[in-house]
Amino acid sequence: MRKIRIAGLLMGGFVLARAIAAPTPDAIAASRVEDFLGQLTSLRAEFRQTVTDARGRLLERAEGSVALARPGRFRWDYRVPEQLIISDGLTVWLYDVELEQVSVRAAGDALAGTPAMLLAGDGDLNGDFEITDAGQQDGLDWSRLTPRREDGDFREVRLGFAGRELRRMTLFDRLGQTTELELLQVERNPRFDSSLFKFEPPPGVDVVGRVPVG
Protein backbone atom coordinates (compact mmCIF):
# COMPACT_ATOMS: atom_id res chain seq x y z
CA MET A 1 0.00 0.00 0.00
CA ARG A 2 2.84 2.36 0.84
CA LYS A 3 4.37 1.81 -2.62
CA ILE A 4 1.04 2.57 -4.24
CA ARG A 5 0.70 5.79 -2.26
CA ILE A 6 4.23 6.86 -3.15
CA ALA A 7 3.62 6.08 -6.82
CA GLY A 8 0.42 8.11 -6.68
CA LEU A 9 2.24 11.08 -5.22
CA LEU A 10 4.93 10.83 -7.85
CA MET A 11 2.37 10.64 -10.66
CA GLY A 12 0.52 13.60 -9.20
CA GLY A 13 3.73 15.60 -9.17
CA PHE A 14 4.46 14.55 -12.77
CA VAL A 15 1.03 15.68 -13.95
CA LEU A 16 1.42 18.99 -12.10
CA ALA A 17 4.85 19.55 -13.65
CA ARG A 18 3.46 18.90 -17.11
CA ALA A 19 0.61 21.32 -16.46
CA ILE A 20 3.01 24.00 -15.31
CA ALA A 21 5.26 23.45 -18.33
CA ALA A 22 2.41 23.51 -20.87
CA PRO A 23 2.62 26.62 -23.09
CA THR A 24 -0.21 29.11 -22.89
CA PRO A 25 -2.35 29.97 -25.93
CA ASP A 26 -0.62 33.36 -26.10
CA ALA A 27 2.80 31.69 -26.08
CA ILE A 28 1.70 29.37 -28.90
CA ALA A 29 0.35 32.34 -30.88
CA ALA A 30 3.65 34.19 -30.46
CA SER A 31 5.62 31.10 -31.43
CA ARG A 32 3.64 30.77 -34.68
CA VAL A 33 4.61 34.27 -35.73
CA GLU A 34 8.21 34.00 -34.56
CA ASP A 35 8.74 30.66 -36.32
CA PHE A 36 7.29 31.94 -39.57
CA LEU A 37 9.28 35.17 -39.64
CA GLY A 38 12.41 33.58 -38.23
CA GLN A 39 12.69 31.27 -41.24
CA LEU A 40 11.56 33.84 -43.81
CA THR A 41 14.14 35.53 -46.04
CA SER A 42 11.84 36.35 -48.97
CA LEU A 43 8.31 35.75 -50.19
CA ARG A 44 6.32 35.93 -53.41
CA ALA A 45 2.53 35.64 -53.63
CA GLU A 46 -0.66 36.77 -55.30
CA PHE A 47 -3.09 38.63 -53.09
CA ARG A 48 -6.70 39.70 -52.86
CA GLN A 49 -7.61 42.66 -50.68
CA THR A 50 -10.81 44.27 -49.41
CA VAL A 51 -11.28 47.38 -47.29
CA THR A 52 -14.46 47.97 -45.26
CA ASP A 53 -15.52 50.88 -43.07
CA ALA A 54 -16.56 50.81 -39.41
CA ARG A 55 -20.07 49.73 -40.45
CA GLY A 56 -18.82 46.87 -42.60
CA ARG A 57 -19.53 48.59 -45.91
CA LEU A 58 -17.15 47.72 -48.74
CA LEU A 59 -14.93 50.65 -49.67
CA GLU A 60 -12.38 49.05 -51.93
CA ARG A 61 -11.53 45.77 -53.60
CA ALA A 62 -8.08 45.12 -55.06
CA GLU A 63 -5.77 42.37 -56.23
CA GLY A 64 -2.19 41.99 -57.37
CA SER A 65 1.14 40.46 -56.48
CA VAL A 66 3.67 40.98 -53.72
CA ALA A 67 7.40 40.30 -53.50
CA LEU A 68 9.47 40.95 -50.40
CA ALA A 69 13.08 40.36 -49.44
CA ARG A 70 14.19 40.86 -45.88
CA PRO A 71 15.36 43.17 -44.54
CA GLY A 72 13.26 46.08 -45.68
CA ARG A 73 12.67 45.48 -49.38
CA PHE A 74 9.25 44.86 -50.88
CA ARG A 75 7.09 45.46 -53.94
CA TRP A 76 3.29 45.50 -53.94
CA ASP A 77 1.91 45.61 -57.49
CA TYR A 78 -1.80 46.45 -57.51
CA ARG A 79 -3.48 45.54 -60.77
CA VAL A 80 -6.92 46.89 -59.85
CA PRO A 81 -6.63 49.82 -59.14
CA GLU A 82 -3.21 50.22 -60.75
CA GLN A 83 -0.74 51.26 -58.07
CA LEU A 84 2.78 50.36 -57.00
CA ILE A 85 4.26 50.48 -53.50
CA ILE A 86 7.97 49.70 -53.45
CA SER A 87 10.82 49.98 -50.96
CA ASP A 88 14.55 49.41 -51.28
CA GLY A 89 14.94 49.48 -47.50
CA LEU A 90 15.77 53.17 -47.41
CA THR A 91 12.94 54.81 -49.38
CA VAL A 92 9.28 53.98 -49.95
CA TRP A 93 7.61 55.07 -53.19
CA LEU A 94 3.86 54.98 -53.80
CA TYR A 95 3.02 55.39 -57.48
CA ASP A 96 -0.62 56.03 -58.37
CA VAL A 97 -0.88 55.49 -62.11
CA GLU A 98 -4.32 57.09 -62.50
CA LEU A 99 -3.31 60.24 -60.60
CA GLU A 100 0.12 60.31 -62.25
CA GLN A 101 1.64 60.98 -58.84
CA VAL A 102 4.49 59.50 -56.82
CA SER A 103 4.70 59.94 -53.03
CA VAL A 104 8.12 59.49 -51.43
CA ARG A 105 8.94 58.87 -47.76
CA ALA A 106 11.82 57.55 -45.70
CA ALA A 107 11.21 53.87 -44.95
CA GLY A 108 11.79 54.23 -41.23
CA ASP A 109 9.15 56.94 -40.90
CA ALA A 110 6.62 55.35 -43.24
CA LEU A 111 6.77 51.77 -42.01
CA ALA A 112 7.50 51.74 -38.29
CA GLY A 113 4.98 49.47 -36.57
CA THR A 114 3.14 48.61 -39.81
CA PRO A 115 2.32 45.19 -41.35
CA ALA A 116 4.72 45.85 -44.24
CA MET A 117 7.62 46.25 -41.83
CA LEU A 118 6.36 43.25 -39.86
CA LEU A 119 6.81 41.00 -42.90
CA ALA A 120 9.83 42.62 -44.51
CA GLY A 121 11.65 44.13 -41.53
CA ASP A 122 14.29 42.76 -39.21
CA GLY A 123 13.34 44.71 -36.11
CA ASP A 124 12.46 43.56 -32.61
CA LEU A 125 9.17 41.71 -33.11
CA ASN A 126 8.25 41.52 -29.42
CA GLY A 127 9.54 45.04 -28.89
CA ASP A 128 7.26 46.39 -31.63
CA PHE A 129 4.17 44.25 -30.98
CA GLU A 130 2.35 42.52 -28.16
CA ILE A 131 1.37 39.08 -29.48
CA THR A 132 -1.67 37.19 -28.17
CA ASP A 133 -3.92 34.34 -29.26
CA ALA A 134 -6.95 35.22 -31.43
CA GLY A 135 -8.49 31.74 -31.64
CA GLN A 136 -9.55 29.77 -34.72
CA GLN A 137 -11.67 31.01 -37.61
CA ASP A 138 -12.20 29.89 -41.21
CA GLY A 139 -9.97 26.88 -40.59
CA LEU A 140 -7.00 29.04 -39.60
CA ASP A 141 -5.14 29.64 -36.34
CA TRP A 142 -4.97 33.35 -35.60
CA SER A 143 -2.38 35.44 -33.79
CA ARG A 144 -3.17 39.01 -32.71
CA LEU A 145 -0.43 41.66 -32.87
CA THR A 146 -0.99 44.97 -31.13
CA PRO A 147 1.56 47.70 -31.92
CA ARG A 148 3.29 49.06 -28.84
CA ARG A 149 3.56 52.45 -30.53
CA GLU A 150 0.36 54.46 -30.47
CA ASP A 151 1.27 56.85 -33.26
CA GLY A 152 0.96 54.35 -36.11
CA ASP A 153 -1.96 53.92 -38.51
CA PHE A 154 -2.91 50.44 -37.26
CA ARG A 155 -4.30 49.53 -33.87
CA GLU A 156 -4.29 45.77 -34.44
CA VAL A 157 -3.06 43.17 -36.93
CA ARG A 158 -4.23 39.55 -37.05
CA LEU A 159 -2.34 36.82 -38.87
CA GLY A 160 -4.11 33.62 -39.93
CA PHE A 161 -1.99 30.49 -40.31
CA ALA A 162 -2.64 27.13 -41.94
CA GLY A 163 -0.10 25.03 -40.11
CA ARG A 164 3.14 26.98 -40.42
CA GLU A 165 2.08 28.99 -43.47
CA LEU A 166 0.62 32.49 -43.44
CA ARG A 167 -2.62 32.68 -45.42
CA ARG A 168 -4.53 35.76 -44.23
CA MET A 169 -3.92 39.16 -42.67
CA THR A 170 -6.58 41.36 -41.10
CA LEU A 171 -5.62 44.95 -40.35
CA PHE A 172 -7.66 47.29 -38.14
CA ASP A 173 -6.73 50.94 -38.46
CA ARG A 174 -7.39 53.81 -36.07
CA LEU A 175 -10.16 55.21 -38.29
CA GLY A 176 -12.29 52.09 -37.90
CA GLN A 177 -11.49 50.63 -41.31
CA THR A 178 -10.64 46.95 -41.76
CA THR A 179 -8.35 45.59 -44.47
CA GLU A 180 -8.57 41.88 -45.30
CA LEU A 181 -5.62 40.44 -47.21
CA GLU A 182 -5.63 36.89 -48.59
CA LEU A 183 -2.36 35.42 -49.83
CA LEU A 184 -2.46 32.93 -52.73
CA GLN A 185 0.18 30.87 -54.56
CA VAL A 186 2.66 31.62 -51.80
CA GLU A 187 6.33 30.88 -52.54
CA ARG A 188 8.69 31.07 -49.60
CA ASN A 189 12.30 32.20 -49.86
CA PRO A 190 12.61 32.67 -53.64
CA ARG A 191 15.56 34.57 -55.09
CA PHE A 192 15.05 38.07 -56.48
CA ASP A 193 17.23 40.41 -58.49
CA SER A 194 17.87 43.58 -56.49
CA SER A 195 16.56 45.67 -59.41
CA LEU A 196 13.05 44.47 -58.56
CA PHE A 197 13.07 46.82 -55.56
CA LYS A 198 14.39 49.89 -57.37
CA PHE A 199 12.13 52.65 -58.65
CA GLU A 200 12.51 55.68 -60.89
CA PRO A 201 9.50 58.00 -61.25
CA PRO A 202 8.22 57.99 -64.84
CA PRO A 203 8.76 61.23 -66.78
CA GLY A 204 6.06 63.82 -66.29
CA VAL A 205 4.55 62.55 -63.04
CA ASP A 206 4.27 64.71 -59.92
CA VAL A 207 6.64 63.71 -57.13
CA VAL A 208 5.58 64.55 -53.57
CA GLY A 209 8.27 64.29 -50.90
CA ARG A 210 12.05 63.90 -51.08
CA VAL A 211 14.27 60.85 -51.41
CA PRO A 212 16.21 60.47 -48.13
CA VAL A 213 19.99 60.68 -48.26
CA GLY A 214 22.12 58.00 -46.62
Image (cartoon, rainbow, N blue to C red):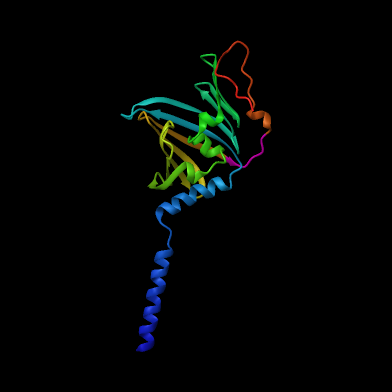
Residue sticking out furthest to the top? 204
**Residue 86 at x, y = what percent?**
58, 27
* Span highlighted in magenta in the image: 187-192
Dividing the picture into quarters, in which one does residue 101 lie? Answer: top right
- Give the residue displayed 47% in from the left and 26% down from the top: 62
Q: Main secondary structure of the magenta part?
A: loop
**Residue 184 at x, y = what percent?**
52, 37
The vertical placement of 198 against 128, above or below, is: above
* Label total for image: 0
Residue nearest the viewer, comparing 125 with 41: 125
The vertical placement of 176 against 37, above or below, is: above
**Residue 5 at x, y = what percent?**
35, 84
Reply yes or no: does residue 159 show up in magenta: no
Residue sticking out furthest to the front? 214
Residue sticking out furthest to the left? 55
The vertical placement of 69 against 84, above or below, is: below
Reply yes or no: does residue 188 show up in magenta: yes
Q: Quadrant of the N terminus?
A: bottom left
- Give the residue displayed 59% in from the left and 40% down from the top: 187
- Give the residue displayed 63% in from the left and 29% down from the top: 197
User: Horizontal placement of 188 versus 175: left or right?
Assistant: right
Dividing the picture into quarters, in which one does residue 201 lie? Answer: top right
**Residue 11 at x, y = what percent?**
40, 76
User: Horizontal placement of 12 versus 193: left or right?
Assistant: left
Q: Quadrant of the C terminus?
A: top right
Residue nearest the viewer, comparing 139 with 204: 204
Residue nearest the viewer, comparing 131 with 141: 131
